[in-house]
Image: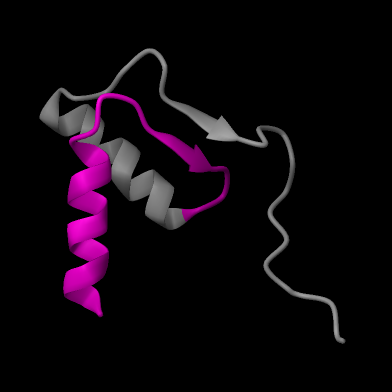
Amino acid sequence: MKVDAMLDKTICAMSSVFIGSSGSTFTDDILRLRKDWGSASLCDEYLCQGELPNYVADDE
């Protein structure tokens, strides 16, 4: 599973544009990699910017 996550991060970090989730450590890692690797774009942004993430699903 860790290999899959690292592969996903690498693919996202090498993309021409990345749109991530605010409050996500996965997104933060990708944005850090993009900056370090020089692949960051002015078009990189957060989806639903300004909204707090809801990690807990309602009981059904």
Which residue is pictured at 18% across the width and 49% down the height?
Answer: 10
Residue 59 within the magenta-colored segment of the rendering: no
Instruction: Choose between 21 and 28: the one closer to the eye.
Output: 21
Query: In the displayed structure, does residue 4 sit left or right of residue 37?
Result: right
Quarter of the image for the C terminus: give it.
bottom right
Quarter residue 49 falls in: top right
Tell me where residue 20 appears, x and y as whole percent. 47, 41
User: Compared to 42, does 40 lie above or below?
Assistant: below
User: Compared to 37, does 42 lie above or below?
Assistant: above
Query: In the displayed structure, does residue 34 sit left or right of residue 19?
Result: left
Q: Which colour scheme is used?
A: one colour
Query: In the displayed structure, does residue 36 sit left or right of residue 52?
Result: left
Tell me where residue 42 appears, x and y as whole percent. 38, 12
Tell me where residue 50 appears, x and y as whole percent. 72, 34
User: Compared to 6, does 13 lie above or below?
Assistant: above
Quarter residue 41 falls in: top left
Which residue is pictured at 27% across the width and 66% down the height?
Answer: 5
Which residue is pictured at 56% across the width and 49% down the height?
Answer: 23
Query: In the displayed structure, does residue 27 sit left or right of residue 46?
Result: left
Which residue is pictured at 76% across the width and 75% down the height?
Answer: 57
- Number of marks in picture: 0
Tell me where residue 43 appears, x and y as whole percent. 41, 16
User: Compared to 10, does 18 lie above or below?
Assistant: above
Residue 3 within the magenta-colored segment of the rendering: yes
First to last magenta residue range: 1-24
Residue sitting at the far bottom: 60
Quarter residue 1 falls in: bottom left
Residue sitting at the far left: 37
Instruction: Choose between 47 and 38: the one closer to the eye.
Output: 47
